[in-house]
Image (cartoon, rainbow, N blue to C red):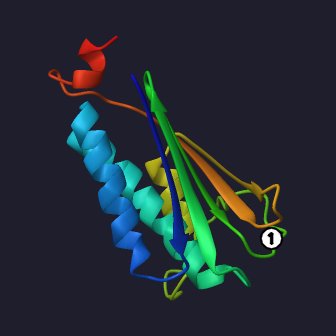
Amino acid sequence: MLLRLALSLPRDAATVPVSRRILNSALAAIGVEDTCRADICLALAEACANVIMHARTGEVYDVIVRAESDECVIEVVDTGIGSPVTDLPVVPPDHDSESGRGLMIIRAMTDAAHLGISPAGGLAIRMVKYLVWRADAPARRAV
């Protein structure tokens, strides 16, 4: 079974919970286990929040999801001018810092993540999470 989602969203904070709920519902419907879904949705929310807070230009951003077999790949792409950042940080921010934890959270919640520049010139983050299935998962029965 293959799950594909593509969302094009306005760069507005109200879209973060919308994208998270849509993805959570879709993954639940195919039988992804609760804790695995929670990790994926937290990483997605952080990536979307980063676009909203840090993209320098662009009115919209895209969320592209592919879940197949035992892997979920999520891409969040802004349509603005890309940043020179090309890798996720490995050192956390100072304990009293007001920001800077989003990419560290993404790194902790996923099995792989990479920042890059999208073909359109915006910043893109690609996250991979290995899926854990419920015993009664419809996606597992369909294989």
Residue 79 pos. (x, y %):
71, 70
For residue 102, above or below residue 119: below
Q: Nearer the viewer, residue 70 or 108?
A: 70
Q: Amino acid at mark 1?
A: Gly
Tell me which corner region of the image, top left, top right, bottom left or bottom right, holds residue 73: top right
Question: Residue, x 70% and y 80% (percent of image)?
Answer: 58
Q: Which residue lies under the disc numbered 1?
A: 82
- Asked if residue 93 lies left or right of residue 14, the reply is right
Say what secondary structure mark 1 lies in: loop
**Left of 95 or right of it: where is 51?**
right
Choose between 69 and 61: the one closer to the eye.
61
Judge the density around disc 1: few (<14), some (14-19), many (≥20) Cα neighbours within 10 Å. Answer: many
The quarter of the rendered structure image containing the N terminus is top left
Residue at (29% x, 23% y) in the render: 139
Relative to 18, 110 lies left or right = right
Assign the C terminus to one quadrant of the image. top left
Question: In the orientation shown, which residue stands out farthest toward the left?
Answer: 136
Name the residue at 49% across, 88% down: 96
Left or right: residue 129 compared with residue 36: right
Residue 76 picture location, percent across and down: 59, 59
Picture quadrant of residue 119: bottom right
Percent across and percent down for residue 101 are: 52, 72
The quarter holding residue 85 reads bottom right
| Residue drawn where x is 44% and y is 82% of the image | 13
Residue 71 visible within the image? yes
